[in-house]
Amino acid sequence: MATSIGDLLDMVNARAADASRAERGAALARLGRTLSALRVDGLTEAVGSLHEDHVSMLAVACQALRPAARAADSRLAELSGAAGDAVTTLRESLTRQSRWALAVAYADTALTLAKVDQFNPPTHPADQESLRLIHSAAQQIARDAALDPPTGSGSVILDAPIPGQAVAEPIWAEGVLNAVADLVRATRPESEPLTIGQTLAVTLAAEQLAVRAAELVGSTTPVAGARALDAAKAWRAVRVELRPFNDGTRRPQDYMPPVVQVAERVHAMTTIGFHASGLPGRQQAEIAAAAQHLPTLAINLSRTVQQWADGGMLLASDRDLPPREDRADMHLHRYRQGGIVRMTHLVRADGADLAETIAALTDVHTLAVVAAADVSRATARGPVTPPRRLVAVHQAKLADHAHGNTVLAAQHDTYRRLRAVASEPPSPSRGR
């Protein structure tokens, strides 16, 4: 089952040789429409650049095939259309870099489809000319991409989960990966802001998945397994930083929101009574592929926390927050002769109050990238294909020598947060 735009394009490439010429023509037409839409939204900082001109040429050539050269309905066309629909749905969240990455990937797929007819060209001159133009424009885009390659952050969109409905009754064969994909979709910036209760549920599910992934790595490489386990502890540290804050959703609720239902699915499917290395091979591969999405989940939650800060959506007791000069009067009024605490004040949390929570999620992202890279290496030959573009992005980050210091700092801060909560006395006002 396809879970991303990249998966759909891979399926189109795999089916190209076995499809009829008319089916490939219909798929090319749909690719052309998507390329045209990407070009309209902009691919480069400069309007009308050579990159954009080449994409326009390819879009026109793909749609120039005669109607007689296209199959009205085919599985290949449906896959191409589904990839285009996903781009349309994600349009508001696309950046210039992600649009360029998509254009390069679509051009590569168009070239794959056109190459099949290279040694058996169509008989109609118009179709021959269209295929020649597709070859020329797609190859030019490939040269453009070699000189100006899509960025790692832009290429992530190819592995972004396809927007859609959550699977109501998941099964293990494709359950964990789909459930995590649903979780990533539900936490995207354009979705409704999460509540504290929903965020806690997401972090619990992510921690459980990270623990299972660490077990998979640790069964073959204990050092890498210990590193991967740090990512699970980092998710726990996020909940530590969220303890002072509340929005009324920490108490039991009559209604379980969809994001909590999905988080419970992930938690339930990764809660097993034995070591993850004892799972069947396909289930291990599912966990490994799902772990590749945990860095993206951390980024999504960071944006959620920033929304809380910008909107003043959370409350906290001033005694549970670090002292600040602008709240000095509150702290002074709390004390009377003998230093007895008489009162507490509720304040709206702002960016300064939530800065440490955002920092904790940044550390989660750093450690989750390390864990994801270790897991992908440990399960590279599994029966479930991991999101290869995400894997490439994670490997590229680890290749940066400066990233090593960032990882050490993230590990240190995670253990600092966990030690702090273990050593402090219980407080009746602190959120639980």
Image (tube, rainbow, N blue to C red):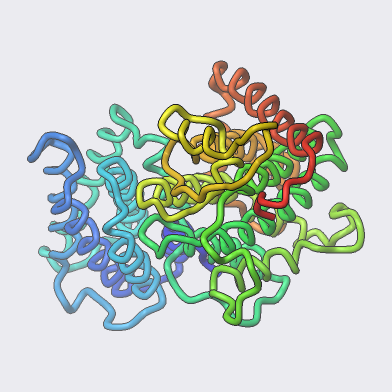
Q: Quadrant of the C terminus?
A: bottom right
| The residue positioned farthest toward the front in the image shown | 337
Residue 145 position by quadrant: top left
Residue 409 appears left or right of 390? right
Does any portion of residue 295 appear in the rendered image?
A: yes
Residue 197 appears left or right of 60? right
Q: Residue at x 17, y 46 (%)?
A: 42
- Residue 26 lies, in percent from the top left, at 27, 72
Q: Residue at x 15, y 43 (%)?
A: 52
Q: Is residue 168 above or below residue 420?
A: below
| The residue positioned farthest toward the left in the image shown | 48
- Residue 55 lies, in percent from the top left, at 18, 47
Of 96 and 421, nearer the camera is 421
Of 44 and 405, nearer the camera is 405
Residue 279 position by quadrant: bottom right
Q: Residue at x 16, y 77 (%)?
A: 67
Does any portion of residue 361 appear in the rendered image?
A: no
Residue 4 appears left or right of 112? right
Q: Residue at x 29, y 74 (%)?
A: 22
